Image: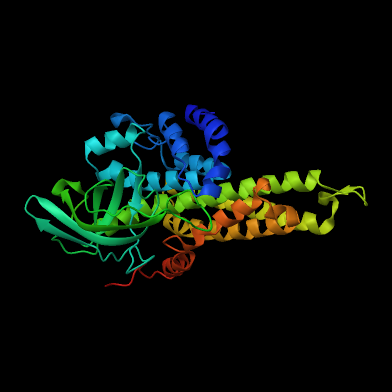
């Protein structure tokens, strides 16, 4: 087993898993888990070795997210967003920021979705206006994971001066003019601190720009989107694996005393559990095929990337729904863990790009149409 997986297993066993219930119950950001992951080198895993990182790629990041999701969905989502932002920072960010991220003590996240355009992340309404040597940012971001806890937001805006739909910025999360996010009180992923963040006259240096002015959408489609979609697939798979294991343990140990049989000996229970296993295995195969397509440069690689989040999200919803049915009334008790997976699984469907948006993208791709209509 690679060293980083050994380190990850230790952090999950001793920190992440024991704190998962509290993060869910209290809606508390998993600060201790994130700090431990940073110390173990997991937050810097995909940063280049030349700046002190682990030098690993998307496949390794996907395995990390999958394993974390099996223990704590909130922690997994925080790391997922961190990796997606890091992919762009590695390619286009300043060396100082890259070194901070590689060191494992600097948490990043995406700040794309906005109040006016919602899940249509490709259409930012927030503005960037030159003001001498600085740039003034104004926006109303609708959902930002790790809001108030990240160190840097990968921020989208309309272009500063160039043509194009979007420009990206590395915005310090403590910059004056950023609102302090309200606590997140959601259905699932209750500890991921996903909240609105507004910018009013936030000043950043011009060199906070990530990549060329006006080309932020190209960067998002080339780097952020593949990482986010693939890691989202891994996240959903981790939830499915965990709830399948919890369901297996329940049905093989819980007995119908009057029949002297376990729940697993009941044909309907077995059939539903088999459906859970098949759907989980199918998602695992699609994720592996997607990663393989990317590594080998297959012509259908981008199609697989567009498919994986949508497919895995819907499969996770189906599997966790079946788990609630198979485990019956026991699934409604928090100690079994099933109802937490049931709630956490539903987030992927509505996270931008949503399942509906991805279905449109897939349909466009297979019909040789552009992903986005020209503005």
Q: Quadrant of residue 367?
A: bottom left
Check the image and report above or below for 154 versus 107. Answer: below
Taking the image as shown, residue 76 lies to the left or right of residue 213, namely: right
Taking the image as shown, residue 338 lies to the left or right of residue 42, namely: right
- Report the quarter where the C terminus lies: bottom left
List x then y, in percent, for residue 353: 42, 62
Q: Quadrant of residue 229?
A: bottom left
Which residue sits at x=65%, y=49%?
334
Taking the image as shown, residue 151 lies to the left or right of residue 305, namely: left
Taking the view exactly as shown, the residue that stands out farthest to the left is 132
Residue closer to the observer: 76 or 14: 14
List x then y, in percent, for residue 198: 29, 58
Residue closer to the observer: 286 or 15: 15
Q: Quadrant of residue 364?
A: bottom left
List x then y, in percent, for residue 43: 40, 36
| Total marks placed | 0
- Report the quarter where the N terminus lies: top right
List x then y, in percent, for residue 315: 59, 58
Residue closer to the observer: 165 or 68: 68
Which residue sits at x=48%, y=44%?
75
Check the image and report above or below for 249 versus 140. Answer: above
Whether residue 364 is visible, yes or no, is yes
Check the image and report above or below for 284 versus 311. Answer: above
Whether residue 282 is visible, yes or no, is no
Q: How is the image coloured?
A: rainbow
């Amino acid at each position: 087993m690679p060293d980083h997986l050994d380190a990850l297993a230790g952090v999950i066993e001793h920190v992440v898993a024991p704190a998962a219930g509290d993060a869910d119950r209290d809606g508390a950001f998993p600060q201790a888990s994130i700090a431990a992951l940073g110390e173990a080198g997991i937050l810097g895993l995909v940063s280049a070795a030349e700046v002190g990182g682990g030098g690993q790629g998307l496949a390794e990041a996907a395995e990390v997210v999958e394993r974390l999701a099996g223990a704590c969905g909130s922690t997994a989502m925080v790391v997922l967003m961190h990796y997606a932002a890091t992919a762009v920072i590695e390619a286009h960010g300043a060396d100082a920021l890259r070194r901070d991220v590689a060191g494992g003590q600097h948490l990043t996240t995406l700040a794309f979705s906005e109040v006016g355009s919602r899940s249509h992340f490709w259409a930012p309404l927030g503005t960037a206006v030159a003001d001498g040597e600085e740039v003034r940012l104004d926006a109303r971001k609708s959902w930002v994971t790790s809001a108030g806890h990240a160190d840097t937001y990968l921020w989208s805006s309309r272009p500063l001066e160039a043509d194009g739909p979007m420009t990206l910025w590395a915005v310090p999360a403590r910059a004056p003019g950023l609102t302090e996010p309200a606590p997140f009180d959601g259905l699932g992923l209750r500890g991921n601190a996903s909240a609105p963040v507004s910018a009013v006259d936030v000043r950043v240096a011009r060199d906070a720009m990530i990549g060329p002015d006006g080309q932020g959408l190209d960067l998002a489609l080339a780097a952020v989107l593949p990482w986010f979609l693939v890691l989202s697939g891994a996240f959903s798979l981790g939830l499915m694996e965990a709830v399948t294991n919890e369901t297996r343990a329940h049905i093989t140990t819980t007995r119908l005393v009057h029949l002297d049989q376990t729940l697993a000996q009941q044909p309907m229970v077995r059939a539903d559990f088999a459906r859970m296993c098949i759907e989980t295995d199918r998602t695992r195969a699609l994720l592996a095929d997607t990663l393989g397509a990317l590594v080998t440069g297959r012509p259908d690689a981008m199609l697989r990337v567009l498919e994986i989040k949508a497919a895995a999200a819907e499969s996770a919803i189906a599997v966790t729904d079946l788990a609630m049915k198979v485990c019956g009334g026991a699934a409604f008790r928090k100690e079994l863990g099933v109802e937490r997976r049931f709630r956490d699984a539903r987030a992927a469907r509505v996270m931008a790009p949503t399942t509906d948006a991805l279905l449109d993208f897939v349909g466009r791709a297979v019909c040789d149409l552009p992903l986005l209509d020209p503005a």
